[in-house]
Image (spheres, helix red, strand yellow):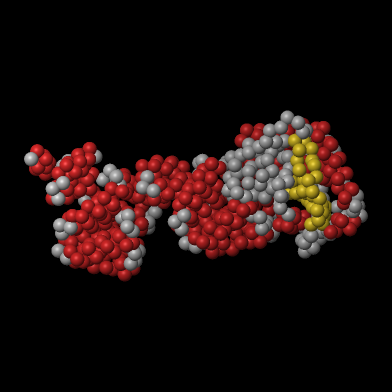
Amino acid sequence: MRNKGVIILCFLWLTFISGWAQATEDRVVTLKVMVDEEFRLGHDNRTVIPRIIAQVSDRFSRMFHIRFEIGTLDSWASDNSRHTLFGLLDDLRKKTIKDGYDVVLGFSAQDLTEGHYAGMASYLTGYVLVREPPFQAPRSDVLEHELAHLFGAVDIRESGSIMDMARIGENYNTFLKRIIRVNRHRTFDPFVFPLAKLQRKRAIALYQERRDLWGDEPDVNIMLALLYLEEKQYAAVENACREILTGYPDMPEVHSLLGIAYRKQGRVDEAIAEYHTALSYHPHNPEVYYNLGIALMTKGHVEDAVVQYRKAIELLPGHARAYGNLGYVYLKQGRVGEAILECRRALGLYPALPEVLSTLGAALIIQGRYDEAEIVSRQALDLAPDLAGPYANLGIVLLRRRKADEAVEVYLTAIKLAPDSSEHHFNLGRAYLIQRDSAGAVRAFGRAIELNPRYHQAFTNLASAYLQQGRFLEAAQASRRALTLVPDYPEAQVNLAWALFETGGLEEAESLCRLALELKPELQSAHNLLGKIFEKQGKMEQAYDAYASALEINATFVKTLINMGNLMFKLKRYSEANRYYKSVLALEPRHSQVYNNLAVICYYRKEYDQAWEYMSEAEALGLKVHPEFKTSLQDKIKK
């Protein structure tokens, strides 16, 4: 039984970003020291605490070139209802933020009814708690034991060792010295894994060597499991945890680790069971509630996940990632304002969270705040270049700015990073549609549908791609499939109406457009198509009204501007036609057909030189001008 100290690991869902510092002299570790009222009553904390910290610091400096310095010493109102060291450490974390210090070191003399541990340390978060009975002199060896945990030292079975499970000694064997030196430059940033990749490999080798030589030392396997998890070796995590639980079934940190490994392997129900077991032993652990929330989200139990995230925040108000995950949930629920609020809260606690920045970018896009969305998405990529979400955000921003070529490249990068994301394939298809690469769009939307057969928006946009290709029967089929999934989907109704319009079904097409407008009066494409239908039926005034309604919604909709220009041309209202066509060129300066139309207008207005300039521009852009028109224009100019 370990009765002098215990190392605990606050396991998080995230994959940490590797980071570390370099130093040639003693590494200085700053301490935020917190003392509860029970300890203050029984000890002269202003003298005794600095003295024992100095003693430990001197030893660490001589052996490992590590020094501990008190940054501040303050009081902590510990919760008298917490009767275990686990509970007290949770309370310390809940009530004390680091404020830029490396380590929070708590001292308590609170009476405990459960357990006999003298101290506890969280390797990942950098929180340490030392408990001494009232009116007994605090022991520097207990403090040294716990601080050694922060540098990778583990409880071992070795008499005389500072890390001995049975009785704390003062010696450091070769293994302990080597593992502490590997951890000497560890980071204390709670969102960054303590060791860089090379140091992780060295640590794994040392722990494996110790395990193979000495066997039953559970902390060795715990550290191995933690390192295996960071290395994404989930089967190895599972094996290490199972080996521990064979002899020590009541270790909550091991059940939590095992739960993470199960979830990473897609075994979500088993993960949830392990989290519940961990909570039965350690009911105030915020990270377990957080991880449970992630597992429930994976199962689609969104509201239950929100409850767990809120519980994690209740237990640890500084849990930035829990706020970030709440933001993600709210975004998926369409609660965009709340999503932004939760993301801002997360980033206020810790600004360098790329996943949260990505979620915030997506929410800002929905609100039409594209410049802000671009800024936070690029910040996310600066932190995590391999994160797919920010690329998807940037793609939407680029499409909004009519930069389809750049958007395609961005979406291809997103797909490379997350090939099974139906949304990324869908957005790539949208970019191809804007490029008028209908074949690419068909492929992209088809892949999105393969990944998500109920993706009604993908069916609707697939219909748009078929319409570009003139495959009207297939466009109708894709639209009907979307309407089977979502019967009151106005965009699918308009696409079906287009397919019917092109195949002569004008009356049904008109009915579908009117139905779409009942559902969504601001749907510009429906007004535009109604204009085409009326024009085809010879109802020119109604066509004009329909096009005008479309342009009231969006005055920069190029298709409607062209249709209105064409209508004005048919009505011989050349000045108005000229104005609409020029509006198109202001938006799309390389629109060859519009140059051709302007040339025809100038021809009828006997402005032959200007007509020739427009026609030449159309040809330069690749349009094949009607030869009879060109010949006639040449004749007019010669005369």
Percent position (x, y) of residue 306? 57, 62
Horizontal relation, residue 238 to residue 561: left or right = right
Pick whichever, 591 or 42, lies toward us: 591
Percent position (x, y) of residue 459? 32, 55
Residue at the spot 41% in from the left edge and 50% down from the top edge: 396
Residue at the spot 53% in from the left edge and 45% down from the top edge: 379
Q: Which residue sits furthest bottom? A: 518
Pick whichever, 231 or 495, lies toward us: 495
- The quarter of the picture where residue 553 lies is bottom left
Residue at the spot 22% in from the left edge and 56% down from the top edge: 576
Horizontal relation, residue 177 to residue 272: left or right = right
> Is residue 538 something one can see in this rendering?
yes
In this rendering, the answer to whether 548 lies above or below 617 is below
Pick whichever, 491 or 418, lies toward us: 491
> Is residue 2 something one can see in this rendering?
no
Percent position (x, y) of residue 352? 59, 46
Horizontal relation, residue 541 to residue 556: left or right = left
Horizontal relation, residue 329 to residue 545: left or right = right
All told, the count of numbered labels is: 0
Residue at the spot 73% in from the left edge and 57% down from the top edge: 95
Q: Which residue sits furthest top? A: 24
Pick whichever, 590 or 80, lies toward us: 590
Percent position (x, y) of residue 272? 58, 57
- Classify the position of the C terminus by image quarter: top left
